Amino acid sequence: SYRNHSFDELTLAGGASSDLTMDNKIWAGFLNGNLGFFPDARLNPYLTFGLGIARHDLDIDPLPVLGIDRISGDRTVIAYQLGAGSYYRVADKTHLWLGYRYFGTERPTFRNTEIDYGAHEIRAGIKQNF
């Protein structure tokens, strides 16, 4: 999977703000497992889990407000995901699905700066079996 997060402003708790240019691109690959509870029922709740690796490609312009120089580089770390949802059968081999997934990684370190990354996702789709 691929994710790209960009930010253009930083606001501190005291109200001070600064322009910010930050990009964090993440490529991830997983070995996943799914556990469906009622596979033959019209409504089939499931749990999903996965373990894999993620490559963070980070680029942050200098932040004079915090005394931070430019940070740039890439790191590969352990990644994981956990989720739950349900399939709803609308035809013999066609299902609608709705689910939640949490995606997280170990904290990559860039020049003494640790990045804490996690994402909450609501997902929906159509599944067609052949």
Image (cartoon, helix red, strand yellow):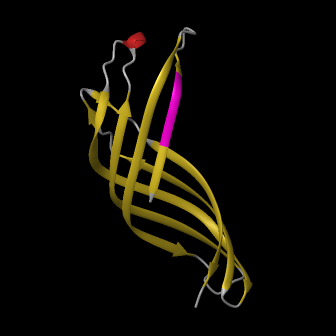
Residue 25: percent from left, percent from top: 41, 45
Residue occupying the point 51% across, 31% down = 7
Residue occupying the point 45% across, 55% down = 2
| Residue 62 among magenta residues | no
Residue 101: percent from left, percent from top: 54, 56
Residue 38 vertical placement versus 33 (above, below): below
- Write down the region rendered in magenta: 5-9
The dominant secondary structure in magenta is: strand
Foreground of the two, 46 or 105: 105
Which part of the image, by quadrant, shows the C terminus? bottom right
Residue occupying the point 47% across, 50% down = 3
Residue occupying the point 34% across, 45% down = 56
Foreground of the two, 32 or 68: 68
Residue 23: percent from left, percent from top: 43, 37
Residue 129 vertical placement versus 30 (above, below): below
Q: Is residue 23 left or right of residue 57?
A: right
Q: Which residue is farthest left?
A: 111
